[in-house]
Image: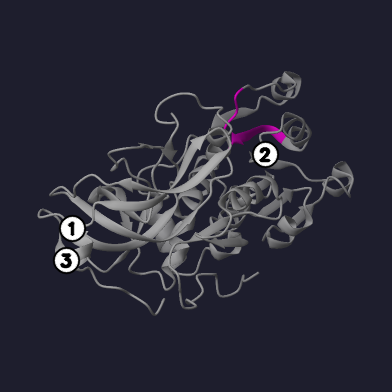
Amino acid sequence: MPASQPEATADTKAMKKSKAIVFSGVRQIELREVTLKPVSSTDVLVETWWSSISTGTEKMALNGLIPSPPFIFPFIPGYETVGKIVEAGDHVNQSLIGKFAYVAGSFGYEDVNAAFGGASQFIVCPVESITILDDIANPQCGIALPLGATALHIVDLAGVKGKKVLVLGQGAVGILAAELSKHMGASLVAVTEPYENRLRISSADIKVNPERQDVSAALAGYEFDVLIDSTGIMSAIETGLRFVRFHGTVIFGGYYQRMNIDYSQAFDKELSFIAARQWAKGDLQRVRQLIADRKLNAEKIFTHRCKLDNDLMAAYNQAFNDPDCLKMIVEWQAEIAPAAACSTESGKS
């Protein structure tokens, strides 16, 4: 647990301003002062300790590819934030003050749009939108809750117990989906990924680099019950379909603007296709418990970090473009003591 744990003060309770990361235009990022909405009777005020960078939605938004509310410039990004509750509204349990919580984002600003609004020094949000991290030794690992919940939902939809699973892509979601598939009882987990560092982090039984290996030779003799895609690459999906058994299941675990794959394989094998939308109710809590029980190694995806006073554009560019950067953590506190690990006891990377 980090050693420095500032208590709420009268000055904090009266605070109306906050530093925030703001996307001010296409490929323009700045750290600016924003105005918070008042804390209502059902809100909490959270002081951010860590946030993270989304390499999907935020990359598209910064490049102006989502020209619709709430992505109208200027706006505050961020939906992967962990901080400490420093104030609670009159109708909120006051014992929450001082606890760490995962915050999915906030619309609690008066002078700037929020999409999703979690990249802010202080965050005003409804108490029901937070997840308390009491039982996690290192609360920083709460950053992994949304990606973990997304992966868990994918694995739930796949019904992997006792099945052979092939996961395409070992980005953060793919790595967690492979690990969760093993935890949920898959008989075999294989993955494909062209970047060696990602393969090294993966806990899969079989790891294939399609840039260095013949995929057909590496997977010869295997028929998979489930194919999980986390690449969004149509050619990778088409190759993967060759290894799915008759009446197998394909889970689309990413977001796809258009689907364009050879239908003949789906037709010949009578495959079932399922689109995974995000996560189901209760999945955030389930992932929190898996991390707390050290049954899910969330920490393995935290590959890079930066301070708030670093070059933010450089940090975002690295998060978006460096294949070795699975998850960039932004540190909002000036000094944070080393914290306990949140990895599995047998699966540290």
What residue type is disc 3 on? Ala
Instruction: Report which residue position mark 3 lands on.
Output: 10
Answer yes or no: is residue 235 visible. yes
The secondary element bearing badge 2 is classed as: loop
User: Residue at image x 18%, y 50%?
Assistant: 39
The secondary element bearing badge 3 is classed as: helix
Question: How far across and down, in percent of the image, does residue 164 sit?
Answer: 67, 48
Instruction: Report which residue position mark 1 lands on.
Output: 14
Q: Is disc 3 surrounded by few (<14), some (14 to 19) or many (20+) residues within 10 Å?
A: few
Cα gap from disc 1 to disc 2, whole angstroms = 46 Å
What residue type is disc 2 on? Thr
Asked where in the image residue 253 lies, by quadrant, the reply is: top right
User: Residue at image x 51%, y 40%?
Assistant: 157
Answer yes or no: is residue 297 visible. no
Q: Say whether residue 250 is magenta.
A: yes
Q: Say whether residue 337 is magenta.
A: no
User: Residue at image x 31%, y 40%?
Assistant: 107
211 or 261: which is nearer to us? 211
Question: Which label sits on residue 231?
Answer: 2
